[in-house]
Amino acid sequence: MEEDVVEIPGEVTQRLRVAEMVAVMTGAGVSAESGVPTFRGDGGLWKNQRPEQLATPQAFEKDPDLVWEWYHWRRGLIRESSPNAAHHSLVQIERNTPQFTLITQNVDGLHLTAGSKTVLEIHGNINRARCSSCSHRVPLSDETGVLTCGQCGALMRPDVVWFGESLDHGTLEASHSASGSADFFLVAGTSSVVQPAASLAYAAKEKGGYVLEVNLDPTPLTGTADVTLLGKAGEVLTALVEKTWDG
Ligand code: BJW
Ligand code: ZN
């Protein structure tokens, strides 16, 4: 059977090859080929739960057992997964670019496992817990149940950003700065509906950056992006790297 070949327009590779500053925004679609479920759309939903139902401070206040159970279950899945071709391609892009910042909404840590160096995890990391009272942080491995703080005894919570919560100020500042100065901004595997993450591509475009979107389907960003390549992130990004630097 003939394999599908992803067509990468020459304009895209040309722009990427000459870019001084590349910024990338990734979302759950980039980890989908590692077997990590996305939040929305077909095959999405973690354990049939909408993120709006469990990824909130209100849900945690009401039922910390349920929320912790959900996160322990997700962490177990993530522990079994490994980076895919999309993560590896982004490592290659970083190596080939003078200045590079990878902004990720993903909490699975797979970009760091793959070897990306400059990574801003704007929604936190599921493999850490932090105290809801004193901000003490601990790495997690195979814990179960509700966790309490070793420093002050208060409830620990996953070290992620829930709906209605502010993103870490410094991380958000760094993301704005990278987006605003990027001459090439790549948005991959995100539905581009969650703020403030979704706004960064528009900011990059306004400042004159070239915006490439990679997704299985069109998103609200598609009308604004310079080019949208529809396909699996692993396949499209592999083809992008090959065509940009290997011929
Ligand atoms: C593939 C693929 C393959 C699949 N290859 N592609 C302004 C306007 C309106 C609302 C707001 C606003 N400002 C703030 C808000 C409220 C809210 C918000 O944005 N709501 C919207 C839903 C409307 N934002 C917040 O509350 C944020 N806080 C904030 O702004 O604080 C200040 C403030 C507070 C209150 C009021 C106003 C201001 C915080 C947002 C935190 C989001 N947290 C979560 C959970 C993290 C922890 C956890 O993991 O449990 O982050 S929600 C969830 O969504 C998670 C994700 O990072 C995030 C984005 O999802 P993502 O990555 O885009 O995944 P999907 O599943 O949506 O999409 C996958 C995509 O991949 C799809 O497009 C597929 O097609 C594609 N795909 N396979 C390529 N192989
Ligand atoms: Zn504490």
Image (cartoon, rainbow, N blue to C red):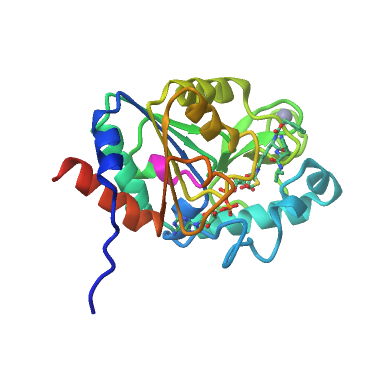
Nearer to us in this view, 206 or 166: 206
Query: Could you say where residue 238 lies in the image, as x and y percent from the top left?
Result: 28, 52
Please tell me in which quarter of the rendered image ligand 2 is found. top right
Please identify the quarter of the rendering in which residue 169 is found.
top right
Query: Could you say where residue 162 lies in the image, as x and y percent from the top left?
Result: 70, 41
Q: Is residue 23 visible?
A: yes
User: Does 100 sit left or right of 191 as displayed?
Assistant: left
Furthest residue to the right?
62
* Residue at image location 47% in from the left, 41% down from the top: 225
The image shows residue 115, relative to residue 48, as above or below, that is above
Query: Could you say where residue 9 lies in the image, as x and y percent from the top left?
Result: 29, 48
The image shows residue 54, relative to residue 183, as above or below, that is below
User: Does 150 sit left or right of 44 as displayed?
Assistant: right
The image shows residue 142, relative to residue 150, as above or below, that is below
Query: Could you say where residue 80 lies in the image, as x and y percent from the top left?
Result: 45, 60
The image shows residue 188, relative to residue 119, as above or below, that is below
User: Does 154 sit left or right of 138 as displayed?
Assistant: right
Furthest residue to the left?
247
Furthest residue to the bottom?
1
Q: Is residue 215 magenta?
A: no
Q: Is residue 111 magenta?
A: yes
Nearer to us in this view, 205 or 199: 205
Nearer to us in this view, 133 or 163: 163
Q: Is residue 145 visible?
A: no
Task: Give, as a single range, the part of the protein colored magenta.
Answer: 107-112
Quarter that holds the N terminus: bottom left
Quarter that holds the C terminus: top left
Q: Count every numbered label the image shows and give the total.
A: 0
Please identify the quarter of the rendering in which residue 124 is found.
top right
Nearer to us in this view, 59 or 40: 40
